[in-house]
Structures are given as C-alpha cells and as structure tokens.
Image (spheres, helix red, strand yellow):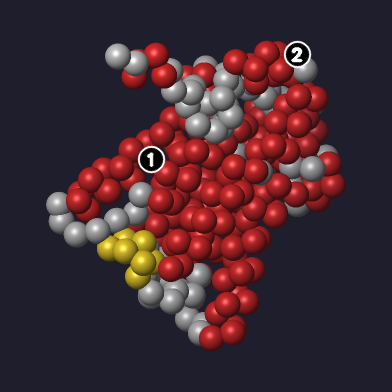
C-alpha cells in the first residue's frame, strides 16, 4: 500500500516537472514566433556574419522540419522514449515531442542571424491591414490546433495522463470545423502567419518560402500514417475534403 502511494506520488512529481517544462517552452516559442515574424526577423540574439551566419542559419532552418518529421517515425519515437524516466516513455511521448518542437522553434526564431535586408515594408494604412491579417492567421492557427486536439498539440496529453496514472487517450481523427474545409488547416494557417508580416525581410522571405514548401509536402507523410491508423474512415474523409486550399464553387461566379 505504501509502495503504491509512493509510486503515485513519484508519477505526479515527474508529470508536473515535464508538464511545466513543456508549457513554458511552448509559451516562449509562441511569443518568440509572434514577435519575430511580425518584425521581420530584424531583432534576434544571433550575431554571426558572413559564412558563419549562412551555415548557422541553414542549420536552424533545416533542424525543425527534419526533427519534427523524424520524431514521428518509429525510430524517432523510440528516441523520445529515451528522454523520459524508465517506464514512462510511451506515456510522456507527446509531452516530450511538443517540448522538443518548442525548443526547435525557439532556436530558429531567437538565434537566427539577421541580414537586415528589407524586401518590402508596408506603410500606413496598409500595414494595419497586414497586421490584422497576421492576427487572423494566428487565430486560425490556434483554432485548428484546438480542433486537432489541444491536448496533443500542446503536449498536455502525456503529462496529464501520467499525473492521473492512466494511459494516454488520443483524440479521434480531426475532420470537423476547419478540418471540414481543408485537411491541413494547421499548416495552411502557419503559411499565412509567415507571409502576412507587414515587414518582409530577406530572412523572413527565406524562412517563409522554405516552410511553405515543407507545409505543403510534409503532411503527405502524416497522411500516410493516418491511412494506416484510420483506414477507410480517412480514405472517405480524404475523398471529400481538399488537401491544402479550400474548394471554390465556380457556380457562384456564373452570371
């Protein structure tokens, strides 16, 4: 009896520690993304220049999509398990995944070495429209993340399950709300966030162009996994719902 109580207490302590770290990094990542994108990568802790700046920025640019995709593979998930205390790996997997994703985004948006070369800078009053569009893009990103399962997206699923001493209960396949309009609203919204900054520097342009490519092609691997997990349910959903862009009914433009 005492052993079981001690074990539950230990589980709760580990859960709180991993949960606190996960949500702290998630908050820092979100704020750094918002500020850095809105100001066009002008402000950063990155101070490198020349060839060193180029190499460092290429590394920062690639480490997120490569890591983000790798950690969803079987080998990647086994690596995530190694970052948890013994026997807690599978339970804390989503929490660790979200924590690493946040750390990767923090590295990109805080330690990028800016060139300060401006591609365009929208002046008043059009800049107000761009800011409003950027805020709308963040809103769509938030809504789509919630509809995909906020416990999964924020990493709370893992640590809360450990705290309650139960197995993680993964959300069902998202197909309602924004997911009924397109299959990849999270990636689409993130692209809008990147392209709606009133100040477009060369740095943001490179990041936006590269990540638009990733946001369009990266989910193909996710959909292969969904096909294996959900089978016919996903195939029916896939046949009815556009991939990345909303379907336009041309009948409304006739006459």
Q: How far apart are labels 2 and 1 at the CA level?
A: 32 Å
* Mark 2 vs 1: CB contact within 8 A: no
225 or 13: nearer the viewer: 225
Q: Residue furthest bottom?
A: 50
* Badge 2: residue crowd in 10 Å (few <14, some 14–19, many ≥20): few
Query: Whole-percent x and y of residue 84?
Result: 75, 48
Secondary structure under the numbered disc 1 in the rendered image: helix
Which secondary structure lies at badge 2?
Answer: helix
Residue annotated with mark 2: 232
What residue is shown at x 36% (from left), y 67% (from top)?
A: 119
Residue beneath the point at 52% across and 19% down: 180
Q: Is residue 136 visible?
A: yes
Quarter of the image for residue 158 reads top right
Instruction: Name the spot of residue 179 as percent of width and height, x first.
Output: 53, 23
Determine whether 231 is above or below 95 in the image.
above
Q: Residue 251's image quarter? A: top left
Residue 15 visible in the snapshot:
no
Q: Position of residue 86 (x, y in %)?
A: 82, 45
Q: Position of residue 24 (x, y in %)?
A: 50, 50
Q: Which mark is residue 137?
A: 1
Give the left or right position of residue 71, taking residue 188 as reference: right
Residue drawn where x is 62% and y is 77% of the image: 55
The C terminus lies in which quarter of the figure?
top left
Left or right position of 149 against 229: left
């Amino acid at each position: 009896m005492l052993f079981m109580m001690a074990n539950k207490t230990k589980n709760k302590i580990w859960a709180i520690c991993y949960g606190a770290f996960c949500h702290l990094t998630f908050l820092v990542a979100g704020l750094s993304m918002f500020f850095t994108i809105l100001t066009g990568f002008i402000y950063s802790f990155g101070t490198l220049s020349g060839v060193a700046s180029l190499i460092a920025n290429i590394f920062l640019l690639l480490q997120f999509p490569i890591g983000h995709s790798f950690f969803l593979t079987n080998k990647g998930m086994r690596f995530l398990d190694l970052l948890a205390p013994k026997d807690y790996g599978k339970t804390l997997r989503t929490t660790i995944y979200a924590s690493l994703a946040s750390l990767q985004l923090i590295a990109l948006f805080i330690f990028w070495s800016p060139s300060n070369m401006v591609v365009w800078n929208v002046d008043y009053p059009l800049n107000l429209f761009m800011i409003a569009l950027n805020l709308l893009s963040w809103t769509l990103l938030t809504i789509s993340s919630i509809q995909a399962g906020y416990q999964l997206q924020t990493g709370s699923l893992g640590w809360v399950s450990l705290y309650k001493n139960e197995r993680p209960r993964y959300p069902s396949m998202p197909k309602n709300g924004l997911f009924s309009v397109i299959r990849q609203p999270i990636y689409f919204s993130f692209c809008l966030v990147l392209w709606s900054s009133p100040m477009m520097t060369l740095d943001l342009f490179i990041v936006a162009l590269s990540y638009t490519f990733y946001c369009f092609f990266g989910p193909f691997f996710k959909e292969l996994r969904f096909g294996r997990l959900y089978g016919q349910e996903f195939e029916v959903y896939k046949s009815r719902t556009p991939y990345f862009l909303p379907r336009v009914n041309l009948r409304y433009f006739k006459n």
